[in-house]
Amino acid sequence: MNLHSIKVACSSCNMRELCMPQGLSDQELQRIDDMIGVRRKVKRNEMLFRNGERFNALYAIRTGFFKTSVATEDGRDQVTGFQMAGEIMGLDGIVSDFHSCDAIALEDAEVCVMPFDKIESLSREVTSLQHHVHKIMSREIVREHGVMLLLGSMRAEERLAAFLLNLVQRLHARGFSQTELVLRMTREEIGSYLGLKLETVSRTFSKFVEEGIVEVKQRHVRIVNADALQQLVNNQVACH
Amino acid sequence: MNLHSIKVACSSCNMRELCMPQGLSDQELQRIDDMIGVRRKVKRNEMLFRNGERFNALYAIRTGFFKTSVATEDGRDQVTGFQMAGEIMGLDGIVSDFHSCDAIALEDAEVCVMPFDKIESLSREVTSLQHHVHKIMSREIVREHGVMLLLGSMRAEERLAAFLLNLVQRLHARGFSQTELVLRMTREEIGSYLGLKLETVSRTFSKFVEEGIVEVKQRHVRIVNADALQQLVNNQVACH
DNA sequence: CGGGACGTTGACGGTCGTCAAAATTAGTGG
DNA sequence: CCACTAATTTTGACGACCGTCAACGTCCCG
C-alpha cells in the first residue's frame, strides 16, 4: 500500500474546478483543504480499493486513469466505468459501509483521500459543498442511465462510437485534443464495459478504420470523422 | 395534474422504515413531517415527472408502482428501473436541476413530494437524515451496477431469472409472497429493462414454464423452483 | 359485441460469441 | 541492450442466440 503524506492544498490544485464546488470563500477553501487527509499514489494495475473492503473515504483523481468493475463469483467481471482526473470514486461504498466494486489504476495515478465522515460534517456547514456532493452522486446515476441505454439498445458499432466520443469529450474538457486519444485500457476492458467480446471490439475498430472514420495504431486513436461517429450513436433512428 | 393537499404524517406512515432513517427523535420526526410538502396522486399511465422538466423535489412512493425510462430522440426508450412502495424517485434531476428521465405510474399511485431544498436544509441539521440521503443515492448507484452487469454479460434466461428474483425479493420485503407476484408491466417494458425484445421475454417465460420453474398466467407469476432461477443467475459459471 | 392492446408462437436471418491461429507488442531477466 | 516469454491484438470460420417479421390467440374495456 502506497500511502504518502503529501499535503498539497486544493487551493493550488488545477483539478479543483472539476472536483470541488465553485465560488468558495478563502475560509471555506481552507476547511476543505483540512478535510482532505492525504494523497495516495497508486501504481499501474494496483487496486485503490476492492470489493468487500471497508469504506471510509471518497477519492478524487489528481492524475492517472482508473477502471471500476464488479465481479461475479466465478471471476468474470463487468467494467462499470473508466475514471480520469477530476472524477470521484468510491460512491458505491456509502450505502453499506463496504465497497461493492474494485477500482484499479490503468496507469500510475495519484488520488486525494477524502474521509467520508469529514465530508459529511463539513457539508453540514458549507452549503455549496453539500450541494456539490449531491450533484456528484446524481451525475453518476445519470451517467449510468446512459450506459444502460447503451447496453440495452445499441449495436456494437453504436456502442464503440458512443464510447470513443464520450472519452474524447471528457479528455477535451481537460485540455487534451478533441481528435486524438490514447486508450489506457485493453480491448478486453473496453469490451467488458460495452458488453462485447474483445474480438468484436477489435473487429469494430477495424471496420471504422476501413471506413475512414478513425485511424488506429495500437492504443493510439485518431478520430478522422467525428460526425460519422455521432451519426452512428443517433442512428438508432435509421431503422424507421 | 393531480395535486391533492393531503397532509399525512410520516410518523403514522407504514412505509417510514423503508424511506426514512431509523431512530429519529419525536422532534426530528416532526420536522421531517413538515418537510414533506404534499402527497400527490398519480393515475395509471400518468407521468410523475418527465425528461426536461424542472427538478425541485424527490418523491417517495407510498403506494403504487412506477417505471423510469430514458428516451432517445427517435422515441425509443430504455427502462432504467421499476420502483415500488418505499422507494425514492427523482435523484436524476439533482445534477442539472432538470429531470433526465421519465417516471410513469404503472398502476394508480400515491407519492410524498419532498422539496429538495428542504431536504438539503434539514439534512444540515439532522445528521441521520443527511446520511440517509447519501445512502439512498449510493444504493441507486450500486443497483445500477447490477443492471450493467446483467445487461453486459448475461443471456436472456439469466436476465429474466435475475429480474424475477429481484422483484419477488423486494415484494417479500414489503410483506408479499415470496413465490407469487403480479407483474405490473408489459412484456415490452420488461424487455426494455432487460435489453431484450418482447418476443424474447415471452419465449423465455414459456421456456421456464416448460421446465417447471415458474407458472405463468398472463401477468400472474408463481415461482415454483426458486433454486433453479438462482442457479441460472449464477450459472455464468457453467461455461468453464 | 367488437376493437385494440397485449401476449404467444413460428420461421428465418443477422449480429455477435466462440474457437483457433498468427501477428505484433510489452515486459522481464540475463 | 538483447533475447525470450507473456500479453495483447488481429483476422478468419463457424455457429448460437436473439432480433425481425408475421400470424394468430387472448384479454380488457368501452
Image (spheres, coloured by chain):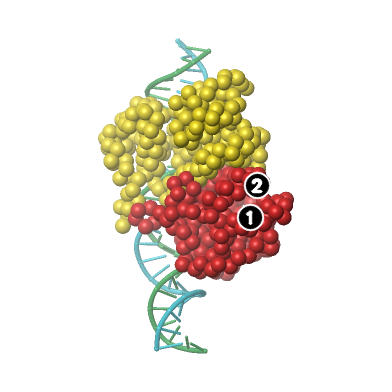
Chain colours: A red, B yellow, C cyan, D green
Amino acid type at circle 2 is Val
Q: Quadrant of residue B18?
A: top left
- For label 1, the crowd category at 10 Å Cα-Cα, with few meaning under 14, some 14 to 19 and many 20 or more, is many
Q: Is residue A202 above or below residue B162?
A: below
Q: Residue at x 32, y 53 (%)?
A: B237
SS assignment at label 2: loop
Q: Is residue A172 left or right of residue B155?
A: right
Q: Is residue A115 above or below residue B129?
A: below
Nearest to the observer: residue B85 or residue B133: B133
- For label 2, the crowd category at 10 Å Cα-Cα, with few meaning under 14, some 14 to 19 and many 20 or more, is some
Q: Residue at x 36, y 40 (%)?
A: B161
Q: Mark 1 and mark 2 in contact (Cβ < 8 Å)?
A: yes
Q: Is residue A55 left or right of residue D26?
A: right
Q: Is residue B92 visible?
A: yes
Judging by the rendered image, the residue that carries numbered circle 2 is A126
Nearest to the observer: residue A22 or residue C16: A22
N-terminal of the pair, mark 2 or mark 1, is: 1
Q: How far across and how far down the image is residue B125, in percent?
A: 59, 39
Amino acid type at circle 1 is Ile
Q: Residue at x 33, y 32 (%)?
A: B178
Judging by the rendered image, the residue that carries numbered circle 1 is A32
